[in-house]
Structure formats: C-alpha cells, structure tokens
Image (cartoon, rainbow, N blue to C red):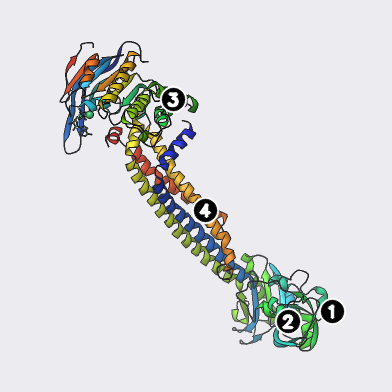
Amino acid sequence: MPNGNGTIINMQGIHKVYDTGKVKVDALKGIDLKIQRGTFAAIIGPSGSGKSTLMNILGCLDVPTDGVYEFNGERVDGLHHNRLAEIRNEQVGFVFQNFNLLPYATALENVELPLIFKGVPTKKRRERAVELLEKVGLGERVSHLAIELSGGEMQRVSIARALANNPSLILADEPTGNLDTKSGRAIIELFEELWQKGHTILIITHDPNIPQRTERVIHIKDGQLTENGNGAH
Amino acid sequence: MASVTFLSQMFRDMRSQKLRTLLTMFGIIWGTSAVILLLSFGEGIHMNQRKSVHGLGEYIVIMWGGRTSQDFQGLPRNREIRFKEEDAALLQTVPHMKAVSAEYGQGGVKARVGKVDKLVRISACWPVFAEIRNLIPQEGSRFINDEDMKYRRRVVFLGTELAEELFPGQDAVGQYIHLNGVPFQVIGVMKQKEQDSSYNSRDTRMTFIPSTTFKTMFGREYLNNIVFKADEPKNVPQVISGVYEALGAKYKFAPDDKEALSMWDTSEMETFFNAFFGGFRIFLGVIGAFTLIVGGIGISNIMNVVVEERTKEIGIKMALGAKKRFVRTQFVLETLLLVTIGGLIGFLFSYAVISLFPLLHFEEYVGIPRMSFSVSVAAISILGLIGLVAGYFPARRASDLNPVEALRL
Ligand SMILES: Nc1ncnc2c1ncn2[C@@H]1O[C@H](COP(=O)(O)OP(=O)(O)OP(=O)(O)O)[C@@H](O)[C@H]1O
Ligand SMILES: [Mg+2]
C-alpha cells in the first residue's frame, strides 16, 4: 500500500481536551490537516505544543474529543476500540523516542509482535521478521535481547517492527531524541530510504537538520497549526 | 491466533518475574495442600472410627432381658423377662430380620494349655454369630458350624490375642485347650480387628463354643442375651418393634413396654458418628476452602501489582495492535496457569504426604488418610473458580488501560 496517490490523512477541526478532573487542557484546538500518500513530513513545534497528542490521534492510538478524521478514506473518529487496534496493527507503524521495545524479548520477538497480533503463522512470521531486521542492518542481532542492544540498534529494531505489517503510514515521535548524532543521522537516512521506496512518513522532531531533508514541514504551536512549509498539500 | 505463540509469549513474560511467580504459586500450593490434607485426614479418621464401631458388628442389636413396667392382661408390672434359646429361634420369623443368635456367657473359666493357666470368658453361640459380630476366621481355620451344634462337639474358636498367648508362635488350630478341665479342640482363630466398643470383654480375648455344648456343660436354662441384625440399616427400628411384639405376645407384656427388654442398637451410634463426621468434614472443607480463597485473594493482589509493573508492556502491545481481548486473555491465562501449576504441586505434595503417612504407623489413632474422589473434585473446582476470579479482575484492569497513558510511563 505504500505507493499510490491520493489523500491518506484528512483532518478537520480536530480538538483534543485532556480532562484530568481538576483542570482541562486544550491540547489541540481545531487542527485541519491533509496529507498525501507518499509524503515525507516533519512536525515541529515547542515543547507542550501538542505534537505527541497529534501523533497519537493520527496513529489511532487516541481518539479526538471533537472533529472529523479520515484515515485511508475511513472515518476513524469514534470507531470501536477493536477496529482501532486493527488499524494500528495493519496500517500504522510507530517509532518512539524511547523505543518502547519489550526489554526481555529478543530483537526477533519484538519485530514479530505486530505479526502475532495480525495472526501471521509462525514460519512466515519468522521469515518476515528476519527479513526486516536484515533490511535495517541488524541481520547479526536477531537473537539478542533488546536490552543488550545499543540505542541506535534499538531504534532500528523498532523501525523494523513498525514496518512489519507493511503499514501505509509511519509515525515517528522524536526518533533521534535519545541517540547520538551519528546514529541519529543513520536513522534519518533509513527513513529517507523508506520514503524513497514509497512509504508515507511523519516525523516529530526537535532536530533542526531533519526539516531540511523533508518535503514538507508542519509547524504546530499551542495546539494549532501555524504554517505548512514547502508547499505540497 | 496460534495458541503456541501465545503461550510462549506468556512464558517469556512470566520468566522475567521468577520470584514473584514463585511466591504467588506458594500461596496456592499451600491452599491446595491444606484442603486436600484436611479432608483426607478427616476421611481417614472417619473410616477408622467406623471400622472400630463395626468391630462389634454392623448395625446389630444386642438384647438382654428386662422388667415389665406396665400391668398387662391382668398380670402385674415388675415381672422379670428372661429368654431361652428357643426365643432366638422364634425371632427369626420377625419381618426384615436377617440373622439372630442366642448367646450364653460365662466368665472366670480356667483355660489350660500344657502348664499355662488363664482365666477366660466363654461366649456360647450359634454359627451365625460370626457373621453378626464380624468374627472372621484366620486363613485355614473356621468358626462353629451346624455339625458342631448338632453333635455338641467340644470345639472352640479363639480370639486373636488369647490364641497368641496360649499358643505363642504356634498354629493353635487342631490343638487342645482345657476349659474348666474339659478338653476342647481349637477349630479357629479370629482375624485381627479394630474394636472400640464391646459388652463383656473384647472379642480378641474371648473363647467361643457352640451353645449346645455349653448347655450340656453348665446346665444353664436362660440366655445371657440375644444378638440380631436387620437386613438393612434403615429397617432396624422396624425389626426392634417386631421383636417387642413377638416376645410381648409370648411373655405377655405390652409391645410398647420398653423396659421389658433392654436393647443396645449399635446403628444409633453409627448414625451419630455419621452425622458427627459429616459436620466435621464440612467444617474442614470450609476451613480448606477459605484457605484457598485467601490464596486466591493473594494471587489477585499480586496480579494487580503485576499489571501495574507491566503497564508499559501492555501499552506497547496495544500500540502495536493487540486488542483488549488479547491482553485480558493473557492475564487470565497467566493466573490460571499459576493456579494450575500451584494446584498440581499441592496435589503431588499432599499425595506424597498421604502415601508416606502410613509408614509412621499412626493409623491406630487417626486411621489411614485417604484422598477421595469427591475431595479431589471439590478441590479442583474450587481451585479453577479461584483461578478465574483471581485472574479476571487484574486482567480487566490491564485491558482497560488507556494505551497512551500506559506508554507515557
Ligand atoms: N494525558 C494528559 N493529561 C493531561 N494533559 C496532557 C496529557 N498529555 C498531554 N497533556 C498536555 O497537553 C499538552 C500537549 O502535550 P504533548 O505531549 O502533545 O506536547 P508535545 O508537543 O509532544 O511536547 P514535547 O515536545 O515536550 O513532547 C501539554 O500541555 C501537556 O501538558
Ligand atoms: Mg511529545
């Protein structure tokens, strides 16, 4: 599904209110966002501006308080949690700043997780996971436990995991935030490679180098989009 | 989803929590062992008790004469009622009567073998007495038979202990013993039995001879007592009233004159013990069940902590597309597995204790503990239920976590 044209993300008037009981936080205040298939975009903005909140909603990990969200042509605001889980499993790949790997599982087992939830049979699953780990340059680390890997390697595992079910959207929340410059650069190069193969990739970042490489930059401030750099809508 | 994958995943998750898993299991092992051991020992004690009661005979009635307490058909009260051997024969016609035996008794009889003298008690009875009173002959020996009765043979059946004392280390059968100077041939020795209750002395120290021989020797007219047995335990009361009617008609006393005959109905004792041990078993069962429930609460608590500690893991799985159902199933199964393994170990442990216990030779006091089918079924059902309940709540909590919140940790 990575290739092809058309709109993958279409958000209108998305609001997110965190109601903690005492205070209500307006994290997103009416986001309108349209992203075409095959886009490589960076989302930048100050801390607390709502980047992670936006990403969680984009990835169907969280639901908006208000607004309309169409993902791959399907209305996903207000869907049943089981269907949301399916969408996350098959159409979205997450890459987190702190990797979010199961520490006591091997690299292979970590990559297998989304395949397990999809119900891919053991043999196919194993083959696929090995193939992905090779693709991110970890062919030698297949049976290492996650905690035995370096930060850069962990992030590669999580990228392999994100790619497991060949999702139409890859979301990365500060993927280089915990890495040194060199491994950070390598990760970004990996994303570029994936983009060139046709994946749609959104990266939240504080790294000033990344927006220079993406075709589109989305600025967010105080829960609102301020400008969309580099044109292409 | 392939369940093998699911299980291997689960084992991996549990392996990373060895100590906790072990501690959790210990509660269940303890609970299971407590239930099974309590109930098994209870059962053993009951059986032991029952065997001792049955040492005298199962639901038998021992009847002595008495004194009338009512005027009847012009006859005054306070007449003594005594029976003869023919009365025992008469009672055989009472409906639901299974067996009746007359019994004469004579204590202080001198028994001599070679140079050894002993004072013993003679019970003189009918062949059927053995069946009524559970006197089982040892291998290669027998009780009094009809021929002995008919020919008034001087034959004797010995209690286990007495035979051992009179003929130490020898086979008593076929040897002779003098009772008040009269030679009797030993035809049988009683098999060892448990006996708690008795009238006169315990069977293991008695000599039994044919009633016909006794009558000739001692010239007695009246019996000491009659023993009888109904065809079924539930018919005992009916047989007793039948006996009152039959003897009342013969000796002219009112069938409801309880004092005219004196009876010991051993089935009453058994009914009492059955009720007592029934209550005892319920008591033990309740204690055991509560122990298990406490174990279950412990597990539930620990699983709750486990959920807390594994919130992150749950968040990751959900982000990757695990449905609530998957998370819930995993936690319920983990708990069930803990309970099952714990239960199994508890079972094996109890089984070992129960198997090895007889080696300690305490059976005289507490019997031999036995693991009954119903005990096992009860323990398994309670365990299963506890596993499900203990697992369900933490599992529900886990699956209701908000994935975003779970990941933020
Ligand atoms: N679960 C929550 N409950 C309450 N308030 C929240 C919650 N999550 C986020 N917020 C608030 O919503 C706002 C946006 O948070 P968000 O995490 O999206 O910011 P961010 O742009 O990702 O910041 P950072 O760059 O520091 O990661 C912040 O004010 C934050 O305090
Ligand atoms: Mg953030």
**To which residue does mark 1 refer?**
B151
* Quadrant in the picture for residue B64: bottom right
Residue B166 circle label: 2
The answer to whether residue A179 of the structure is visible from this angle is yes
Query: From where the camera sits, is residue B400 visible?
Result: no
In the image, what residue occupies the spot 27% across and 20% down?
A202
Q: Which of marks 4 and 1 is nearer the N terminus?
A: 1
Which chain contains the residue that carries disc 1? B
Q: Does the residue labelled 2 lie within 8 Å of ligand 1?
A: no
Marks 4 & 1 on one chain: yes
A147 lies left or right of B52: left
Percent position of residue B336, x then y: 45, 44
Up-down relation of residue A192 to residue B88 (above or below): above
Q: Which chain carries label 3?
A: A
Closer mark to the observer between disc 4 and disc 1: 4
Q: Where is residue B324 in the image (x, y as percent from the top left)?
A: 37, 34
The percent coordinates of residue B397 (x first, y second) are 34, 41
| Label 3 sits on residue | A130
Q: Which of marks 2 and 4 is nearer the N terminus?
A: 2
Name the side, left or right, on which B331 lies relative to B148. left
Q: Residues under labels 3 and 4: Cα distance?
A: 44 Å
